[in-house]
Image: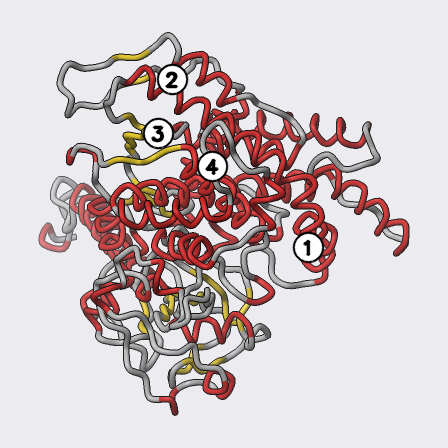
Protein backbone atom coordinates (compact mmCIF):
# COMPACT_ATOMS: atom_id res chain seq x y z
CA UNK A 1 0.00 0.00 0.00
CA UNK A 2 1.25 3.42 -0.89
CA UNK A 3 2.56 5.69 1.96
CA UNK A 4 0.22 8.51 0.98
CA UNK A 5 -2.78 6.37 1.91
CA UNK A 6 -1.72 5.84 5.57
CA UNK A 7 -2.00 8.15 8.69
CA UNK A 8 0.88 8.82 10.97
CA UNK A 9 0.22 7.62 14.52
CA UNK A 10 2.21 10.56 15.89
CA UNK A 11 -0.01 13.20 14.20
CA UNK A 12 -3.70 12.43 14.72
CA UNK A 13 -6.19 14.77 13.01
CA UNK A 14 -7.69 15.83 16.42
CA UNK A 15 -5.64 15.87 19.63
CA UNK A 16 -7.21 14.20 22.69
CA UNK A 17 -6.09 17.13 24.88
CA UNK A 18 -7.88 19.54 22.55
CA UNK A 19 -11.11 17.58 22.84
CA UNK A 20 -10.83 17.47 26.64
CA UNK A 21 -10.16 21.21 26.87
CA UNK A 22 -13.10 21.99 24.59
CA UNK A 23 -15.48 19.86 26.67
CA UNK A 24 -14.14 21.36 29.90
CA UNK A 25 -14.49 24.94 28.67
CA UNK A 26 -18.02 24.37 27.43
CA UNK A 27 -18.98 22.70 30.75
CA UNK A 28 -17.79 25.79 32.66
CA UNK A 29 -19.62 28.09 30.26
CA UNK A 30 -22.74 25.93 30.52
CA UNK A 31 -22.58 25.93 34.33
CA UNK A 32 -22.11 29.69 34.42
CA UNK A 33 -24.96 30.16 32.00
CA UNK A 34 -27.22 27.94 34.07
CA UNK A 35 -26.18 29.76 37.24
CA UNK A 36 -26.85 33.13 35.63
CA UNK A 37 -30.22 31.92 34.41
CA UNK A 38 -31.07 30.61 37.88
CA UNK A 39 -30.07 33.92 39.50
CA UNK A 40 -32.15 35.85 36.97
CA UNK A 41 -35.11 33.54 37.57
CA UNK A 42 -34.87 33.88 41.36
CA UNK A 43 -34.47 37.66 41.06
CA UNK A 44 -37.48 37.85 38.75
CA UNK A 45 -39.60 35.73 41.08
CA UNK A 46 -38.57 37.88 44.06
CA UNK A 47 -39.63 41.13 42.39
CA UNK A 48 -42.92 42.73 43.47
CA UNK A 49 -46.07 42.02 41.49
CA UNK A 50 -48.18 45.18 41.82
CA UNK A 51 -51.95 44.97 42.06
CA UNK A 52 -53.59 46.70 39.09
CA UNK A 53 -54.84 50.24 39.59
CA UNK A 54 -53.53 50.84 43.13
CA UNK A 55 -50.81 53.54 43.40
CA UNK A 56 -47.24 52.53 44.30
CA UNK A 57 -43.68 53.86 44.06
CA UNK A 58 -42.57 52.97 40.53
CA UNK A 59 -38.86 52.45 41.27
CA UNK A 60 -39.71 49.90 43.98
CA UNK A 61 -41.27 47.62 41.35
CA UNK A 62 -37.80 46.65 40.09
CA UNK A 63 -35.94 46.27 43.38
CA UNK A 64 -35.33 42.93 45.10
CA UNK A 65 -36.54 44.24 48.47
CA UNK A 66 -39.15 46.55 46.96
CA UNK A 67 -39.86 49.28 49.54
CA UNK A 68 -38.39 47.17 52.33
CA UNK A 69 -35.00 48.86 52.64
CA UNK A 70 -36.63 52.31 52.57
CA UNK A 71 -38.89 51.24 55.44
CA UNK A 72 -35.95 49.85 57.43
CA UNK A 73 -33.87 53.00 56.88
CA UNK A 74 -36.72 55.30 57.88
CA UNK A 75 -37.27 53.23 61.02
CA UNK A 76 -33.56 53.47 61.82
CA UNK A 77 -33.47 57.25 61.25
CA UNK A 78 -36.65 58.18 63.11
CA UNK A 79 -37.35 55.30 65.50
CA UNK A 80 -40.93 54.88 64.25
CA UNK A 81 -41.29 52.87 61.08
CA UNK A 82 -45.07 53.01 60.85
CA UNK A 83 -44.97 56.78 60.41
CA UNK A 84 -43.29 55.97 57.10
CA UNK A 85 -46.73 55.06 55.75
CA UNK A 86 -47.80 58.68 56.22
CA UNK A 87 -44.84 59.82 54.13
CA UNK A 88 -45.83 57.37 51.38
CA UNK A 89 -49.41 58.65 51.43
CA UNK A 90 -48.09 62.18 50.99
CA UNK A 91 -45.66 61.10 48.25
CA UNK A 92 -48.32 59.23 46.28
CA UNK A 93 -51.10 61.69 47.18
CA UNK A 94 -53.53 58.89 47.81
CA UNK A 95 -55.43 57.55 50.85
CA UNK A 96 -54.90 54.03 49.49
CA UNK A 97 -51.68 52.65 48.02
CA UNK A 98 -49.57 49.50 47.95
CA UNK A 99 -46.09 48.81 49.28
CA UNK A 100 -43.67 45.91 48.78
CA UNK A 101 -41.93 45.08 52.06
CA UNK A 102 -40.29 41.72 51.33
CA UNK A 103 -39.10 39.60 48.39
CA UNK A 104 -41.24 36.67 47.22
CA UNK A 105 -44.26 38.30 48.86
CA UNK A 106 -47.53 39.76 47.70
CA UNK A 107 -48.05 43.53 48.01
CA UNK A 108 -49.47 45.10 51.15
CA UNK A 109 -52.30 47.57 50.66
CA UNK A 110 -52.26 50.57 53.00
CA UNK A 111 -55.39 52.57 53.85
CA UNK A 112 -54.96 55.88 55.70
CA UNK A 113 -58.60 56.98 55.91
CA UNK A 114 -59.94 56.31 59.40
CA UNK A 115 -63.59 56.13 58.28
CA UNK A 116 -62.76 53.21 55.97
CA UNK A 117 -60.61 51.54 58.62
CA UNK A 118 -63.48 51.67 61.12
CA UNK A 119 -65.86 50.40 58.43
CA UNK A 120 -63.60 47.44 57.63
CA UNK A 121 -63.19 46.67 61.36
CA UNK A 122 -66.83 46.84 62.37
CA UNK A 123 -69.14 46.31 59.40
CA UNK A 124 -67.10 44.33 56.88
CA UNK A 125 -65.71 41.68 59.21
CA UNK A 126 -66.51 38.81 56.83
CA UNK A 127 -64.27 40.42 54.21
CA UNK A 128 -61.36 41.31 56.51
CA UNK A 129 -59.88 39.09 59.25
CA UNK A 130 -56.72 38.60 61.27
CA UNK A 131 -53.85 36.66 59.74
CA UNK A 132 -51.01 37.26 57.33
CA UNK A 133 -48.36 39.66 58.62
CA UNK A 134 -49.64 39.70 62.21
CA UNK A 135 -49.76 35.91 62.45
CA UNK A 136 -46.28 35.64 60.97
CA UNK A 137 -44.92 38.23 63.39
CA UNK A 138 -46.49 37.94 66.87
CA UNK A 139 -47.61 34.39 66.10
CA UNK A 140 -44.02 33.37 66.82
CA UNK A 141 -44.45 34.44 70.44
CA UNK A 142 -48.11 33.44 70.91
CA UNK A 143 -48.70 30.49 68.53
CA UNK A 144 -52.07 29.60 70.12
CA UNK A 145 -53.04 33.10 71.25
CA UNK A 146 -56.19 34.71 69.88
CA UNK A 147 -54.33 37.92 69.05
CA UNK A 148 -53.15 36.44 65.74
CA UNK A 149 -55.83 33.80 65.10
CA UNK A 150 -58.40 34.07 62.30
CA UNK A 151 -61.98 34.35 63.57
CA UNK A 152 -62.75 30.62 63.53
CA UNK A 153 -64.55 28.55 66.17
CA UNK A 154 -61.40 28.02 68.25
CA UNK A 155 -60.91 31.78 68.43
CA UNK A 156 -64.51 32.28 69.56
CA UNK A 157 -64.24 29.56 72.21
CA UNK A 158 -60.99 30.90 73.60
CA UNK A 159 -62.17 34.52 73.59
CA UNK A 160 -65.39 33.45 75.32
CA UNK A 161 -63.46 31.73 78.11
CA UNK A 162 -61.35 34.85 78.71
CA UNK A 163 -64.21 37.34 78.38
CA UNK A 164 -65.02 37.37 82.11
CA UNK A 165 -61.57 38.84 82.89
CA UNK A 166 -62.67 42.08 81.18
CA UNK A 167 -66.00 42.54 82.95
CA UNK A 168 -66.40 45.59 85.19
CA UNK A 169 -66.94 43.34 88.19
CA UNK A 170 -63.70 41.38 87.69
CA UNK A 171 -61.60 44.43 86.81
CA UNK A 172 -62.74 46.38 89.86
CA UNK A 173 -62.56 43.47 92.30
CA UNK A 174 -59.36 41.74 91.14
CA UNK A 175 -57.29 43.88 88.74
CA UNK A 176 -57.78 47.38 90.17
CA UNK A 177 -56.36 46.65 93.67
CA UNK A 178 -53.14 45.31 92.12
CA UNK A 179 -52.80 48.31 89.81
CA UNK A 180 -53.41 50.71 92.70
CA UNK A 181 -50.95 48.99 95.05
CA UNK A 182 -48.11 49.01 92.54
CA UNK A 183 -48.77 52.65 91.59
CA UNK A 184 -48.54 53.53 95.29
CA UNK A 185 -45.14 51.81 95.29
CA UNK A 186 -44.12 53.98 92.33
CA UNK A 187 -45.15 57.11 94.27
CA UNK A 188 -42.92 55.96 97.17
CA UNK A 189 -40.02 55.33 94.76
CA UNK A 190 -40.27 58.76 93.15
CA UNK A 191 -40.66 60.46 96.54
CA UNK A 192 -37.37 58.83 97.57
CA UNK A 193 -35.67 59.81 94.32
CA UNK A 194 -36.81 63.42 94.76
CA UNK A 195 -35.16 63.52 98.20
CA UNK A 196 -31.96 62.05 96.74
CA UNK A 197 -31.81 64.00 93.44
CA UNK A 198 -31.59 67.47 95.05
CA UNK A 199 -33.75 69.16 92.40
CA UNK A 200 -32.16 67.41 89.40
CA UNK A 201 -34.16 65.64 86.72
CA UNK A 202 -33.95 61.85 86.50
CA UNK A 203 -34.84 59.13 83.98
CA UNK A 204 -38.00 57.13 84.71
CA UNK A 205 -38.34 54.90 81.64
CA UNK A 206 -37.24 51.81 83.57
CA UNK A 207 -39.39 52.78 86.58
CA UNK A 208 -42.50 52.89 84.40
CA UNK A 209 -41.46 49.79 82.52
CA UNK A 210 -41.11 47.77 85.69
CA UNK A 211 -44.10 49.12 87.62
CA UNK A 212 -46.39 48.28 84.69
CA UNK A 213 -44.81 44.82 84.45
CA UNK A 214 -45.33 44.39 88.20
CA UNK A 215 -49.01 45.26 87.95
CA UNK A 216 -49.90 43.28 84.80
CA UNK A 217 -47.94 40.21 85.96
CA UNK A 218 -49.69 40.28 89.32
CA UNK A 219 -53.13 40.84 87.74
CA UNK A 220 -52.55 37.97 85.30
CA UNK A 221 -50.88 35.36 87.51
CA UNK A 222 -51.36 36.37 91.14
CA UNK A 223 -47.57 36.35 91.57
CA UNK A 224 -45.79 39.44 92.95
CA UNK A 225 -42.35 40.06 91.40
CA UNK A 226 -41.62 43.06 93.66
CA UNK A 227 -39.74 44.96 90.96
CA UNK A 228 -40.47 48.44 92.32
CA UNK A 229 -39.69 47.33 95.88
CA UNK A 230 -36.24 46.30 94.60
CA UNK A 231 -35.82 49.71 92.95
CA UNK A 232 -36.70 51.49 96.20
CA UNK A 233 -33.93 49.61 97.99
CA UNK A 234 -31.43 50.36 95.21
CA UNK A 235 -32.37 54.07 94.99
CA UNK A 236 -31.73 54.54 98.69
CA UNK A 237 -28.02 53.74 98.35
CA UNK A 238 -27.00 54.15 94.68
CA UNK A 239 -27.29 57.68 93.26
CA UNK A 240 -24.93 60.06 91.47
CA UNK A 241 -25.85 63.75 91.73
CA UNK A 242 -23.81 66.02 89.40
CA UNK A 243 -22.71 69.52 90.33
CA UNK A 244 -24.23 70.97 87.15
CA UNK A 245 -27.96 71.63 87.84
CA UNK A 246 -28.69 71.09 84.12
CA UNK A 247 -27.49 67.49 84.32
CA UNK A 248 -29.66 64.60 85.47
CA UNK A 249 -29.14 62.57 88.61
CA UNK A 250 -28.33 58.92 87.90
CA UNK A 251 -29.79 56.09 89.94
CA UNK A 252 -28.31 52.62 89.77
CA UNK A 253 -30.79 49.95 88.75
CA UNK A 254 -31.05 46.83 90.92
CA UNK A 255 -29.26 43.72 89.75
CA UNK A 256 -30.40 40.10 89.87
CA UNK A 257 -33.95 40.56 88.64
CA UNK A 258 -36.20 37.48 88.37
CA UNK A 259 -35.13 35.54 85.29
CA UNK A 260 -38.63 35.77 83.79
CA UNK A 261 -38.23 39.57 83.52
CA UNK A 262 -35.03 39.25 81.48
CA UNK A 263 -36.55 36.43 79.42
CA UNK A 264 -39.57 38.55 78.48
CA UNK A 265 -37.30 41.42 77.47
CA UNK A 266 -35.25 39.14 75.22
CA UNK A 267 -38.36 37.73 73.51
CA UNK A 268 -39.87 41.18 72.92
CA UNK A 269 -36.55 42.52 71.59
CA UNK A 270 -36.49 39.70 69.05
CA UNK A 271 -39.98 40.70 67.93
CA UNK A 272 -38.73 44.25 67.43
CA UNK A 273 -35.85 43.03 65.28
CA UNK A 274 -38.20 40.90 63.22
CA UNK A 275 -40.55 43.77 62.47
CA UNK A 276 -37.74 46.06 61.38
CA UNK A 277 -36.35 43.43 59.00
CA UNK A 278 -36.88 43.73 55.23
CA UNK A 279 -37.56 39.98 55.07
CA UNK A 280 -39.79 38.84 57.94
CA UNK A 281 -39.98 35.16 56.97
CA UNK A 282 -36.20 34.71 56.77
CA UNK A 283 -35.60 36.68 59.99
CA UNK A 284 -38.23 34.58 61.77
CA UNK A 285 -36.40 31.36 60.85
CA UNK A 286 -33.11 32.85 62.07
CA UNK A 287 -34.59 34.08 65.38
CA UNK A 288 -36.12 30.68 66.05
CA UNK A 289 -32.65 29.12 66.05
CA UNK A 290 -30.81 31.65 68.21
CA UNK A 291 -29.52 30.57 71.62
CA UNK A 292 -30.99 33.67 73.30
CA UNK A 293 -34.49 32.95 71.94
CA UNK A 294 -34.37 29.27 72.94
CA UNK A 295 -33.13 30.07 76.45
CA UNK A 296 -35.69 32.85 77.03
CA UNK A 297 -38.48 30.70 75.58
CA UNK A 298 -37.68 27.82 77.96
CA UNK A 299 -37.65 30.14 80.98
CA UNK A 300 -41.01 31.56 79.93
CA UNK A 301 -42.52 28.12 79.32
CA UNK A 302 -41.29 26.66 82.62
CA UNK A 303 -42.47 29.69 84.59
CA UNK A 304 -45.92 29.77 83.03
CA UNK A 305 -46.48 26.02 83.49
CA UNK A 306 -45.55 26.29 87.18
CA UNK A 307 -47.97 29.22 87.64
CA UNK A 308 -50.76 27.34 85.87
CA UNK A 309 -50.28 24.35 88.16
CA UNK A 310 -50.29 26.64 91.21
CA UNK A 311 -53.51 28.24 90.01
CA UNK A 312 -55.16 24.86 89.51
CA UNK A 313 -54.10 23.83 93.01
CA UNK A 314 -55.90 26.79 94.59
CA UNK A 315 -59.00 26.28 92.42
CA UNK A 316 -61.79 28.44 93.83
CA UNK A 317 -62.26 32.20 94.20
CA UNK A 318 -60.30 34.04 91.53
CA UNK A 319 -57.30 36.05 92.74
CA UNK A 320 -56.04 36.80 89.22
CA UNK A 321 -56.96 36.40 85.55
CA UNK A 322 -55.38 32.93 85.38
CA UNK A 323 -57.54 31.71 88.28
CA UNK A 324 -60.66 33.08 86.63
CA UNK A 325 -59.90 31.49 83.26
CA UNK A 326 -59.06 28.06 84.71
CA UNK A 327 -62.29 28.09 86.73
CA UNK A 328 -64.36 29.30 83.77
CA UNK A 329 -62.66 26.88 81.36
CA UNK A 330 -63.56 23.92 83.56
CA UNK A 331 -67.14 25.18 83.92
CA UNK A 332 -67.65 25.80 80.21
CA UNK A 333 -65.97 22.51 79.28
CA UNK A 334 -68.16 20.54 81.68
CA UNK A 335 -71.32 22.28 80.49
CA UNK A 336 -70.59 21.83 76.78
CA UNK A 337 -69.05 18.37 77.04
CA UNK A 338 -65.53 19.26 75.87
CA UNK A 339 -62.10 19.50 77.43
CA UNK A 340 -60.87 22.69 79.09
CA UNK A 341 -58.10 24.87 77.65
CA UNK A 342 -54.79 23.12 77.02
CA UNK A 343 -51.52 24.21 78.59
CA UNK A 344 -50.46 25.62 75.21
CA UNK A 345 -53.58 27.77 74.88
CA UNK A 346 -53.37 28.91 78.51
CA UNK A 347 -49.69 29.82 78.24
CA UNK A 348 -50.07 31.76 75.00
CA UNK A 349 -53.24 33.63 75.97
CA UNK A 350 -51.89 34.55 79.40
CA UNK A 351 -48.58 35.66 77.94
CA UNK A 352 -50.35 37.76 75.28
CA UNK A 353 -52.40 39.33 78.10
CA UNK A 354 -49.15 40.17 79.93
CA UNK A 355 -47.05 41.40 77.01
CA UNK A 356 -49.87 43.31 75.32
CA UNK A 357 -51.00 44.93 78.54
CA UNK A 358 -47.48 45.78 79.62
CA UNK A 359 -46.28 47.30 76.34
CA UNK A 360 -49.41 49.41 75.84
CA UNK A 361 -49.60 50.76 79.40
CA UNK A 362 -45.91 51.52 79.88
CA UNK A 363 -45.65 53.41 76.59
CA UNK A 364 -48.87 55.40 77.05
CA UNK A 365 -47.86 56.33 80.61
CA UNK A 366 -44.42 57.49 79.46
CA UNK A 367 -45.96 59.71 76.76
CA UNK A 368 -48.48 61.01 79.30
CA UNK A 369 -45.76 62.12 81.73
CA UNK A 370 -43.86 63.81 78.88
CA UNK A 371 -46.90 65.68 77.54
CA UNK A 372 -48.01 66.79 81.00
CA UNK A 373 -44.48 68.05 81.71
CA UNK A 374 -44.34 69.93 78.38
CA UNK A 375 -47.78 71.48 78.96
CA UNK A 376 -47.77 72.83 82.54
CA UNK A 377 -50.99 74.81 82.02
CA UNK A 378 -52.88 71.65 81.02
CA UNK A 379 -51.28 69.76 83.90
CA UNK A 380 -52.42 72.44 86.37
CA UNK A 381 -55.92 72.43 84.90
CA UNK A 382 -56.10 68.63 85.22
CA UNK A 383 -54.95 68.76 88.84
CA UNK A 384 -57.52 71.46 89.60
CA UNK A 385 -60.26 69.21 88.19
CA UNK A 386 -58.99 66.28 90.27
CA UNK A 387 -59.02 68.39 93.43
CA UNK A 388 -62.63 69.27 92.72
CA UNK A 389 -63.35 65.55 92.93
CA UNK A 390 -61.04 64.91 95.91
CA UNK A 391 -60.39 68.12 97.89
CA UNK A 392 -57.13 68.05 99.82
CA UNK A 393 -55.75 65.04 97.97
CA UNK A 394 -51.94 64.72 97.82
CA UNK A 395 -49.23 62.07 98.07
CA UNK A 396 -50.21 61.36 101.68
CA UNK A 397 -53.95 61.48 101.08
CA UNK A 398 -54.83 59.67 97.87
CA UNK A 399 -58.30 58.54 96.81
CA UNK A 400 -59.09 54.81 96.77
CA UNK A 401 -59.22 52.79 93.59
CA UNK A 402 -62.99 52.40 94.03
CA UNK A 403 -63.39 56.17 94.13
CA UNK A 404 -61.10 56.71 91.13
CA UNK A 405 -63.15 54.30 89.04
CA UNK A 406 -66.51 55.66 90.19
CA UNK A 407 -66.03 59.45 90.02
CA UNK A 408 -65.93 61.41 86.76
CA UNK A 409 -65.16 64.97 85.69
CA UNK A 410 -65.43 66.24 82.09
CA UNK A 411 -61.89 67.66 82.03
CA UNK A 412 -60.40 64.52 83.62
CA UNK A 413 -62.08 62.29 81.02
CA UNK A 414 -61.01 64.65 78.22
CA UNK A 415 -57.41 64.72 79.48
CA UNK A 416 -57.11 60.93 79.61
CA UNK A 417 -58.71 60.56 76.18
CA UNK A 418 -56.32 63.13 74.72
CA UNK A 419 -53.29 61.45 76.29
CA UNK A 420 -54.35 58.17 74.65
CA UNK A 421 -54.88 59.92 71.30
CA UNK A 422 -51.62 61.83 71.14
CA UNK A 423 -49.52 58.98 72.52
CA UNK A 424 -50.33 57.02 69.35
CA UNK A 425 -49.10 53.91 71.16
CA UNK A 426 -50.55 51.53 68.55
CA UNK A 427 -49.80 53.27 65.23
CA UNK A 428 -51.12 50.62 62.84
CA UNK A 429 -53.94 48.18 62.16
CA UNK A 430 -53.72 45.00 60.10
CA UNK A 431 -56.14 42.57 58.47
CA UNK A 432 -56.12 40.07 55.58
CA UNK A 433 -58.78 39.96 52.90
CA UNK A 434 -60.82 36.75 52.99
CA UNK A 435 -62.38 37.35 49.57
CA UNK A 436 -62.13 39.79 46.67
CA UNK A 437 -63.07 43.24 48.00
CA UNK A 438 -63.34 46.85 46.86
CA UNK A 439 -61.89 49.65 49.02
CA UNK A 440 -62.17 53.29 47.95
CA UNK A 441 -62.87 52.20 44.40
CA UNK A 442 -59.92 49.80 44.14
CA UNK A 443 -60.25 46.02 43.80
CA UNK A 444 -58.15 43.96 46.21
CA UNK A 445 -58.02 40.17 45.75
CA UNK A 446 -58.40 37.63 48.55
CA UNK A 447 -55.33 36.82 50.61
CA UNK A 448 -53.85 40.34 50.63
CA UNK A 449 -52.65 42.01 53.84
CA UNK A 450 -54.26 45.40 54.43
CA UNK A 451 -52.57 47.84 56.80
CA UNK A 452 -54.54 50.67 58.33
CA UNK A 453 -52.47 53.75 59.14
CA UNK A 454 -54.77 55.90 61.30
CA UNK A 455 -51.66 57.70 62.54
CA UNK A 456 -52.26 60.10 59.64
CA UNK A 457 -55.22 61.33 61.69
CA UNK A 458 -53.04 62.10 64.73
CA UNK A 459 -49.85 63.65 63.38
CA UNK A 460 -49.24 66.98 61.79
CA UNK A 461 -47.45 65.73 58.66
CA UNK A 462 -50.38 66.15 56.32
CA UNK A 463 -54.01 67.12 55.86
CA UNK A 464 -56.70 64.46 55.69
CA UNK A 465 -57.63 63.40 52.17
CA UNK A 466 -60.91 64.65 50.74
CA UNK A 467 -62.62 61.51 49.44
CA UNK A 468 -65.53 61.35 47.02
CA UNK A 469 -68.39 59.67 48.96
CA UNK A 470 -69.18 57.60 45.86
CA UNK A 471 -65.87 55.75 46.36
CA UNK A 472 -66.80 54.64 49.85
CA UNK A 473 -68.59 51.39 50.62
CA UNK A 474 -72.33 51.52 51.25
CA UNK A 475 -71.82 50.80 54.97
CA UNK A 476 -69.16 53.50 55.23
CA UNK A 477 -71.45 56.11 53.67
CA UNK A 478 -74.13 55.27 56.23
CA UNK A 479 -71.90 56.13 59.21
CA UNK A 480 -69.52 59.02 58.74
CA UNK A 481 -66.85 59.66 61.38
CA UNK A 482 -67.13 63.41 60.93
CA UNK A 483 -64.42 65.86 60.00
CA UNK A 484 -60.87 65.20 61.13
CA UNK A 485 -58.71 67.37 63.33
CA UNK A 486 -57.20 70.50 61.85
CA UNK A 487 -53.65 69.94 60.67
CA UNK A 488 -52.36 72.74 62.91
CA UNK A 489 -53.71 71.01 66.04
CA UNK A 490 -53.08 67.33 65.29
CA UNK A 491 -49.74 67.22 67.07
CA UNK A 492 -50.83 69.34 70.05
CA UNK A 493 -51.95 68.12 73.45
CA UNK A 494 -55.42 69.69 73.68
CA UNK A 495 -57.87 68.02 76.10
CA UNK A 496 -60.40 70.72 75.22
CA UNK A 497 -60.97 69.08 71.81
CA UNK A 498 -63.02 66.42 73.65
CA UNK A 499 -65.37 68.94 75.30
CA UNK A 500 -68.49 70.23 73.60
CA UNK A 501 -69.69 73.84 73.66
CA UNK A 502 -71.38 73.22 77.02
CA UNK A 503 -68.20 71.79 78.56
CA UNK A 504 -69.45 68.21 78.54
CA UNK A 505 -67.15 65.33 77.63
CA UNK A 506 -67.71 63.95 74.13
CA UNK A 507 -65.80 60.73 73.43
CA UNK A 508 -66.78 60.95 69.74
CA UNK A 509 -65.69 64.53 69.11
CA UNK A 510 -63.24 63.43 66.42
CA UNK A 511 -61.43 60.48 64.80
CA UNK A 512 -59.42 58.18 67.04
CA UNK A 513 -58.60 54.48 66.85
CA UNK A 514 -56.11 53.59 69.63
CA UNK A 515 -57.45 50.11 70.34
CA UNK A 516 -58.85 49.10 66.98
CA UNK A 517 -62.58 48.48 66.62
CA UNK A 518 -65.14 45.75 66.09
CA UNK A 519 -64.92 42.12 67.21
CA UNK A 520 -61.15 42.04 66.57
CA UNK A 521 -60.41 45.25 68.46
CA UNK A 522 -57.99 45.18 71.40
CA UNK A 523 -59.32 42.59 73.86
CA UNK A 524 -57.67 44.30 76.84
CA UNK A 525 -58.65 47.91 76.17
CA UNK A 526 -60.90 48.15 79.27
CA UNK A 527 -57.99 46.97 81.43
CA UNK A 528 -55.59 49.36 79.66
CA UNK A 529 -57.89 52.35 80.18
CA UNK A 530 -58.35 51.49 83.86
CA UNK A 531 -54.59 51.12 84.39
CA UNK A 532 -53.90 54.49 82.76
CA UNK A 533 -56.72 56.18 84.69
CA UNK A 534 -55.49 54.98 88.09
CA UNK A 535 -51.84 55.77 87.31
CA UNK A 536 -52.38 59.26 85.87
CA UNK A 537 -54.74 60.35 88.66
CA UNK A 538 -52.43 59.11 91.44
CA UNK A 539 -49.30 60.60 89.84
CA UNK A 540 -50.82 64.03 89.12
CA UNK A 541 -52.21 64.24 92.65
CA UNK A 542 -48.86 63.13 94.16
CA UNK A 543 -46.47 65.26 92.08
CA UNK A 544 -46.09 68.50 90.21
CA UNK A 545 -44.09 67.72 87.08
CA UNK A 546 -41.82 70.71 86.40
CA UNK A 547 -39.86 71.44 83.24
CA UNK A 548 -36.67 69.47 82.57
CA UNK A 549 -33.45 70.73 80.92
CA UNK A 550 -33.65 70.92 77.12
CA UNK A 551 -31.22 68.02 76.77
CA UNK A 552 -33.90 65.70 78.18
CA UNK A 553 -36.99 66.96 76.33
CA UNK A 554 -36.74 64.93 73.09
CA UNK A 555 -39.99 63.46 71.76
CA UNK A 556 -38.24 60.96 69.49
CA UNK A 557 -40.09 57.65 69.45
CA UNK A 558 -38.97 54.02 69.49
CA UNK A 559 -41.19 51.24 68.18
CA UNK A 560 -40.87 47.82 69.80
CA UNK A 561 -44.28 46.19 69.81
CA UNK A 562 -45.92 49.58 70.30
CA UNK A 563 -44.69 53.16 69.96
CA UNK A 564 -42.97 54.61 73.03
CA UNK A 565 -40.66 57.55 73.78
CA UNK A 566 -36.91 57.11 73.43
CA UNK A 567 -36.30 58.89 76.77
CA UNK A 568 -38.53 59.93 79.66
CA UNK A 569 -37.09 62.38 82.19
CA UNK A 570 -39.00 64.06 85.00
CA UNK A 571 -38.26 66.72 87.61
CA UNK A 572 -41.16 66.23 90.01
CA UNK A 573 -41.99 68.00 93.24
CA UNK A 574 -43.78 65.97 95.89
CA UNK A 575 -47.23 67.31 96.86
CA UNK A 576 -47.87 66.89 100.59
Q: Residue at x 50, y 27 (%)?
A: 263
Packing grade of label 2 (10 A; few <14, some 14-19, many >=20) is some
Q: Which of the two labelled residues, at mark 1 and mark 4, occupies the earlier sequence position? A: 1
Q: Residue furthest bottom?
A: 470
Compared with 316, 81 (above or below) is below
Q: Which residue is mark 2?
A: 253
Tell me which colouring the rendered structure shows: secondary structure
Q: Residue furthest front?
A: 391
Please identify, in this view, whether the residue under mark 1 or under mark 2 is nearer the observer.
2
Q: Count the marks: how many?
A: 4
Q: Residue at x 71, y 49 (%)?
A: 169
Q: What numbered label is drawn on residue 572?
A: none
Q: Which of the two labelled residues, at mark 4 and mark 3, occupies the earlier sequence position? A: 3
Q: What numbered label is drawn on residue 159?
A: 1
Side (left or right) of 492 relative to 418: left
Q: Which residue is mark 4?
A: 392
Amino acid sequence: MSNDTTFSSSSPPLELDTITAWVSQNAIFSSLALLAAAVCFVYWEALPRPLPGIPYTTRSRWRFFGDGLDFVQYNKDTGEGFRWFATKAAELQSPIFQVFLAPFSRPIVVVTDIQEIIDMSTRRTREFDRGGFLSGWVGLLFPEGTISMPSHEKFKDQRNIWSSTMTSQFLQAVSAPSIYQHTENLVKLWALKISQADGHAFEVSDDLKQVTFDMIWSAATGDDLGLITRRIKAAAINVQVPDDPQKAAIFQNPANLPEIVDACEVLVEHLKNMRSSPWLAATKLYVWQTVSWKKAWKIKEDTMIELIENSKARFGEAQCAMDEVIKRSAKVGSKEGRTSSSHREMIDETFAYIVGGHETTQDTTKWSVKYLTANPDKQTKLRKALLELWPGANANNLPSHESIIAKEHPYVEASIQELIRIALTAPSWTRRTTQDVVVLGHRIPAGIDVFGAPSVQSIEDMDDFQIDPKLRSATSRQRETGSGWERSTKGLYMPERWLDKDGKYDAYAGPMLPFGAGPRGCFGQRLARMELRIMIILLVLSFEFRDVPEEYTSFRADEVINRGPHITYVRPVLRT
